[in-house]
Image (tube, grey):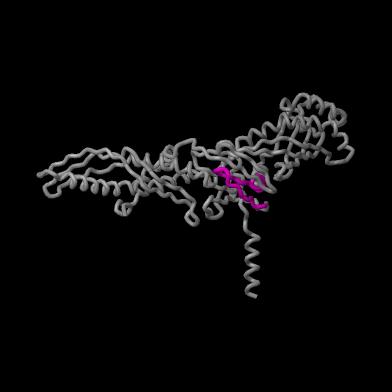
Amino acid sequence: MALFGALFLALLAGAHAEFPGCKIRVTSKALELVKQEGLRFLEQELETITIPDLRGKEGHFYYNISEVKVTELQLTSSELDFQPQQELMLQITNASLGLRFRRQLLYWFLKVYDFLSTFITSGMRFLLNQQICPVLYHAGTVLLNSLLDTVPVRSSVDELVGIDYSLMKDPVASTSNLDMDFRGAFFPLTERNWSLPNQAVEPQLQEEERMVYVAFSEFFFDSAMESYFRAGALQLSLVGDKVPHDLDMLLRATYFGSIVLLSPEVIDSPLKLELRVLAPPRCTIKPSGTTISVTASVTIALVPPDQPEVQLSSMTMDARLSAKMALRGKALRTQLDLRRFRIYSNHSALESLALIPLQAPLKTMLQIGVMPMLNERTWRGVQIPLPEGINFVREVVTNHAGFLTIGADLHFAKGLREVIEKNRPADVRASTAPPPSTAAV
């Protein structure tokens, strides 16, 4: 009985477990690029350290070593690898430093060069341990982590909608890649606590040929469209000169009889064409492509000045859009194209037949007047959770059943030092560097 209860609870927990809307895999192919940029940053950090003067007395020997500067860092061997349970590990072996310093020596007897060489070498090693270890510790655990702070977690996409890239669990590292699960959900900025339940399939990542892979489920796109729907953005009203001239003439001719019967004195009033999405659009991802289904109302009316508008017709429009995804920089962009279009009357089949002549002109109006406005918004894109200064290049998109994956390589558009300096707090070095003795040990 206890076993049955435990199994029931496990199944119940699994039923309520939420799948990620976005997954990211960093493969071992990205590590060489990251290592090169990281080591370059460490070299630049070491060039900025200040080594105190070394002066004192040892028997009859007086010494003063000052103005010590690191001139170069040579790393004969270094490895950056994924480590299960530890995520990333950087190992540096056979490293050497080039130094420049000024020395003043005073001694009372000759033939002490071996002693001086050993003494100076030991003293400089002590000074370097006291200074370089804290710098490496600080650069690795504080400054490089500050780069991760530039990854957007919950941010605005535009003035209406935001996106939540909360990490759903700890990253999982294997010997060849690092996998991360993100919520990947949009939300209206006026309803920050609103959340759309994720009922889509879980995206899967199997590839390892590119540096990075990003997977998006249908939920990712559905939450975006529902958020814009709740924000009131999925509606359009064209009045007067905004209605294409040819369509204006066709609509007036089509509804001439209705205008004469309803209110002939407003026959020359401006025409109004209003489109309003009736329910949140839905995304369908198949191996053959990605489509978005939309149902909207179309209202045609005359708008006489200083008088109530005169409604001529109200119909329903079903449309299907194809969507092509692309990564540009670090933004996911979408290009929409109108594929299928159908209008029908809300009142009778006879009126639906009368609307057939409007099918082609309305579709043309959507393609010419509406689709460019939609694409202007979707082509701005939404940022993928990457640190500042890193972009995607050479992407390839693959569709699956219920999700799509985008593989790409990485490119450092900015150096690590430039990004870190931009985001480094003024007092971070003093507050986070460990005591020299601890770092040296």
- The image shows residue 72 at horizontal and vertical percentages of 33, 38
In the picture as drawn, the residue positioned furthest to the right comes out as 350
Q: Quadrant of the N terminus?
A: bottom right
- The image shows residue 384 at horizontal and vertical percentages of 56, 42
- The image shows residue 359 at horizontal and vertical percentages of 82, 33
Above or below residue 357? Residue 438 is below
Q: Residue at x 18, y 42 (%)?
A: 64
Q: Residue at x 77, y 28 (%)?
A: 271
Q: Which residues are magenta?
A: 201-222
Inspect this view and state whether residue 164 appears.
no
**Res 188 quadrant in image:** top right
Q: Residue at x 66, y 60 (%)?
A: 15
Q: Nearer the viewer, residue 92 or 432?
A: 92
Query: Could you tell whether 348 is left or right of 413 in the image?
Result: right
Q: Nearer the viewer, residue 290 or 76?
A: 76
Q: Residue at x 57, y 40 (%)?
A: 408
Q: Quadrant of the C terminus?
A: bottom left
